[in-house]
Amino acid sequence: MQLEHPAPYSAPAPAACPSVAVPGKPDQGEPEPTAPVETPAPDPEPTVGSALLDELRAQIAKFVILPSPEALDAVTLWVAATHLQPAWQHAPRLAVVGPAKRCGKSRLLDVLTETVHEPMLTINTTPAAVFRSITEEPPTLLVDEADTIFGTPKMAEKNEEMRGLLNAGHQRNRYVTRVVGNDHTPHRFATFAMAALAGIGDLPDTIMDRSVVIRMRRRAEGERVKPFRSRRDTPALHDVRDRIAAWARPLLDEAADLEPEMPVEDRAADTWEPLVIVADLAAGPWPRRAREACARMVTSEVEVEEEQPGGARILADIRRIFFAQREVDSLSTEELLHHLLQNTESPWAEWGRHGLTSRNLSDMLRPFDIRPGNVRLADGTQRKGYMRNKFLDAWRRYCPTVHPVDAEPVAPAAD
């Protein structure tokens, strides 16, 4: 039966709300204008795909407790997207990370193995073997215990080729060239393939930036899941996998042509676009839920990044300090360090052996092309410090969500 699929989901503009006269009240002149009431757009008519996504979602939830309903929606859509890989310009990674053992990471990978398109487990697999396995109809790479590959700087350096493969494979038409055979003939290998990576702790930043990030947690007391048993549970998972593949494959050309409205921009939009397109093809509540999951989970990752020592965190804290100091043109290094060290919610007081130093601060800001220099302060004196206008571009690029009104006033440093 050929089904019609609705256009990509987008909310219509809200209609203005007419004013209503209240009987028994005297005329008090011109009524105050009332803000229009936004009426949520109705969900589009569901297709067969909507019911299949519901079924897959329920199957995943049997065996794994995801950290949020949005994360469960995201994993469901990511699995379905693996069955349409030839349609995508970008192959989103699924980063399944947790702070410790027994958070359900490997169990989720077990379920993914039975539901994604052509799974390829890459535990202890060499990059060369992965190169040779990726074709125009790529498998879905599944990497368990990724912390054993990237968990320390020494490990990451040793496995730089695997990291490069995973980074390059996020976008179509990124090839690597290797010499093969006894005559060392150059050969071009494809890298494009969707991949899920599970491990303790965050993966390298370049991989996390290309990923839908699922931050797993240990089950709390009273939370129960069904034990996964391959012999018993695999047939049901394969059944829903095969029906999703059968639904998705005829839609490949349509999926490739869609350009959905996205709630995020740049690389986050590239990464989430396949999931949103799958949701739009399925229709029903999925277009709305996909965009909600995208917006909330991307925002959450931005907040996590801002909380990390260094990088966007130092920029965000300095932004708050300049705001609290009434946006002065410059601050001395000494005063800036004083405010950073006084912030009890930041890591700077415990940075190194004696807290953050001027040299530490300079090293952290150098990658953003921000350097200290001689600055003239409000009292007319000159000292080593930082000019506010040197931060503007970095603030705009790396911590746009830090709103000045969120900052608490900071007491001036003691003379």
Image (cartoon, rainbow, N blue to C red):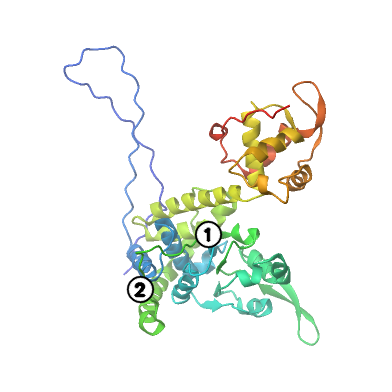
Quadrant occupied by the N terminus: bottom left
* Alpha carbon distance from label 1 to label 2: 24 Å
Residue 190 in the image, given as x and y percentages of width and height? 65, 72
In the displayed structure, would residue 370 be above or below residue 150?
above
Residue at point 46% right, 68% down? 79
Left or right: where does residue 30 sit relative to residue 367? left
Residue situated in front as seen by the camera: 276 or 155: 155
For label 1, the residue is 213
Q: Which quadrant of the view contains residue 88? A: bottom right
Q: Does any portion of residue 298 appear in the rendered image?
A: yes
Please identify the quarter of the rendering in which residue 191 is found. bottom right
Give the secondary structure at mark 2.
Answer: loop
- Tag 2 or tag 1, which sits nearer the N-term? 1
Q: Amino acid at mark 2?
A: Lys
**Which residue is painted at 59% across and 53% down in the image?**
267
Task: Tell us which disc is closer to us: 1 or 2.
Answer: 2
Quarter holding residue 281 = bottom left
Q: Residue at x 31, y 55 (%)?
A: 45
**16 or 229: nearer the eye?**
229
Reading the image, the residue beneath label 2 is 226
Name the image quarter holding the C terminus.
Answer: top right
Residue 350 vertical placement versus 214 (above, below)? above
Name the residue at 37% across, 79% down: 233
Q: Position of residue 300 (x, y in %)?
A: 51, 50
